[in-house]
Amino acid sequence: MESMETMKRMMEISIFEVFEKMFFIFLEHSSDGNNHYDYEASITFSGTVRGEIRLFVSHRVARAMVVNMLGIEEGEITEKDIEDCSKEAVNMICGNLLGKLNNHEGTFELAIPLYHRSPLGITTDSNTTSHSHFKSDDGAMSAALRIYVD
Amino acid sequence: MSFNVLIVDDSNSMRSVIKKIISLSGFKMDQCMEAENGREALDILGKSWVDVIISDINMPEMNGFQLLNALKDDDLLKDIPVIIVSTESREGRMMEAYSLGAKGFIKKPFLPEEIRKILYDVIGVNNHGEYGNNEADDGDFDF
């Protein structure tokens, strides 16, 4: 199994790729892990490694994702649009990450993504969970990769 | 000549994006139908003429592979070309899709040009809607 640090780096590359290609949002690493997030999308995966990815976004980032992906006006954005875009983002990030891992870790199955308002956060056990924080012109976002230990 | 396209994806956003890309690409689309999963897609296929299907894999109720299987077993539907658009880009998944009859595979996230090119390639027409030359131009198009 890849080390947690390697998997984290692979996830970050996937996040940059998805946000640039699908949402036209250019992220930078951030050391600030204390931002407030309004929405969360998560997805679990299973295979030789089991785990989950959680994506936390602020209201501003979520709206930028919708506007840039769907090409609609700010005033037309619905909560369903935010849910759809957030779920699609975490789905693409996870698929992209597992594609990178596939050469080393066998095959994986993805579950259906889930969406939550007002995220509750995630366990911070550094042996099984890795956090990545980002900033952009549209605000902050964060992601967590958690590996389940049987 | 214009074509009827069926987009199958549980994400309304992704269906909208794909629909918009096709519209802006210059692809001669007549009707664009949408389904949230394979089951809905089969309902539409039972009622409407569809020239090409663009489908996700990971969907609730009936996923993209189950849809491919159902199409393969139906004499009336088995020849409709299916393009899989999915986050699941691993080689094994792509091979599985092709073995079930998919004619194309696009990895998400994708560039608009990729959708356009594969549509023309799969349906076997050029940019002017003519059969026989399935080479799509590589030129950009504006959003």
Image (spheres, rainbow, N blue to C red):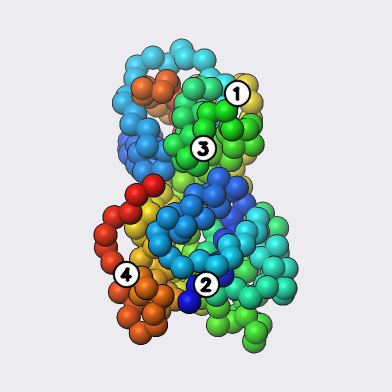
Identified by mark 4, the residue type is Ala
Identified by mark 1, the residue type is Pro
Rate crowding at label 3 as few (under 14), some (14 to 19) or many (20 or more) other CA atoms within 10 Å. Answer: few
What is the C-alpha distance between the residues marked 1 and 3?
26 Å
Looking at the image, which is closer to me, B64 or A149?
Answer: B64
What is the C-alpha distance between the residues marked 2 and 4?
16 Å
Residue A72 at x, y percent in the picture: 51, 37
Q: Chain of mark 2?
A: B
On residue A72, the disc is: 3
Residues at discs 2 and 4 both on one chain: yes
Marks 3/2 in contact by CB < 8 Å: the verdict is no
Q: Could you tell me if residue B7 is visible in this image?
A: yes
Marks 1/2 in contact by CB < 8 Å: the verdict is no
The vertical placement of B41 against A89, above or below, is below
Looking at the image, which is closer to me, B94 or B9?
Answer: B9
The residue under label 4 is B136
